[in-house]
Amino acid sequence: MGKRLHLAAALLATVIVTVFCTATLTVELLGTHPQVALVKQLIVFPGLAILIPALAVTGLSGDRLAQTHGHPLVGRKMRRMRLIAGNGVLVLAPCALYLSHLASAGRFHARFVTIQGLEICAGITNVVLMALNIRDGLRISRGL
Ligand code: HEM
């Protein structure tokens, strides 16, 4: 049960962050301002409302699984999880809230572009860290 919950929460969180990044890039490149504002709003709600619990369940269930594993990759996963959570709480969530606020007010100028660039870099970093945790999770569970 613990392992299945961990797998489900981890994949859900990874898919959500990937969808945030692709939806943002697509609408920024091809969309109109009202479409950008809609995507920014959907990322805040329901996006963050699903992502934050999914990340919390991933971390907690991972911690529980780690107690029965002496595998050397566990420590690396734990360190990556700290970066993922720190990046999410300190960079991604504040950026998402502020971008949604600016977009709903029709303010798409220098500040929006700068924060949008920061959000994309932080989002891609988290997708990479999460992909590495999936790879190492599969290695651990296969006993490699
Ligand atoms: C975003 C973060 C994470 C992702 C995407 C992730 C993903 C995964 C995946 C895909 C598996 C394979 C599950 C299976 O084969 O059914 C796994 C297993 C595992 N994960 Fe994570 N994980 C994350 C965070 C963590 C954390 C923070 C820990 C704690 C150190 C952890 C510890 C483990 C352990 C010990 C296993 C092996 C379970 C077993 O075979 O019994 N994971 N993880």
Image: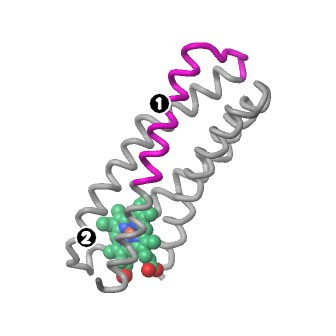
The local secondary structure at tag 1 comes to helix
Task: Write down the residue under mark 2.
Answer: 73
- Residue 65 seen in this snapshot: no
Is 111 contained in the magenta span? yes
Mark 2, residues whose alpha carbon is within 10 Å: few (<14), some, or many (≥20)?
Answer: some
Residue found at x 43% / y 58%: 130
Residue found at x 57% / y 21%: 113
Question: In which quarter of the view is residue 42 placed?
Answer: top right
Distance from label 2 to label 1 (Cα)?
A: 29 Å
Task: Write down the residue under mark 1.
Answer: 118
Question: In which quarter of the view is residue 106 placed?
Answer: top right
Query: What x and y, as percent, mark residue 40?
Result: 67, 34
Q: Quadrant of ligand 1?
A: bottom left
Which is nearer the eye, 28 or 16?
28
Identified by mark 2, the residue type is: Leu
Query: What x and y, as percent, mark residue 27?
Result: 71, 36
Query: Mainly helix, strand or loop, the magenta region?
Result: helix
Residue found at x 58% / y 44%: 21
Question: In which quarter of the view is residue 75 placed?
Answer: bottom left
- Residue 117 seen in this snapshot: yes
Is 66 contained in the magenta span? no
Which is nearer the eye, 101 or 106?
106
Check the image and report above or below for 143 versus 88.
Answer: below
Query: What x and y, as percent, mark residue 18?
Result: 57, 52
Q: Earlier in the sequence, mark 2 or mark 1?
A: 2
Residue found at x 51% / y 25%: 115
The local secondary structure at tag 2 comes to helix
Which is nearer the eye, 141 or 86?
141
Mark 1, residues whose alpha carbon is within 10 Å: few (<14), some, or many (≥20)?
Answer: some
Q: Quadrant of the C terminus?
A: bottom left
Identified by mark 1, the residue type is: Leu
Highlighted range, magenta: 104-128
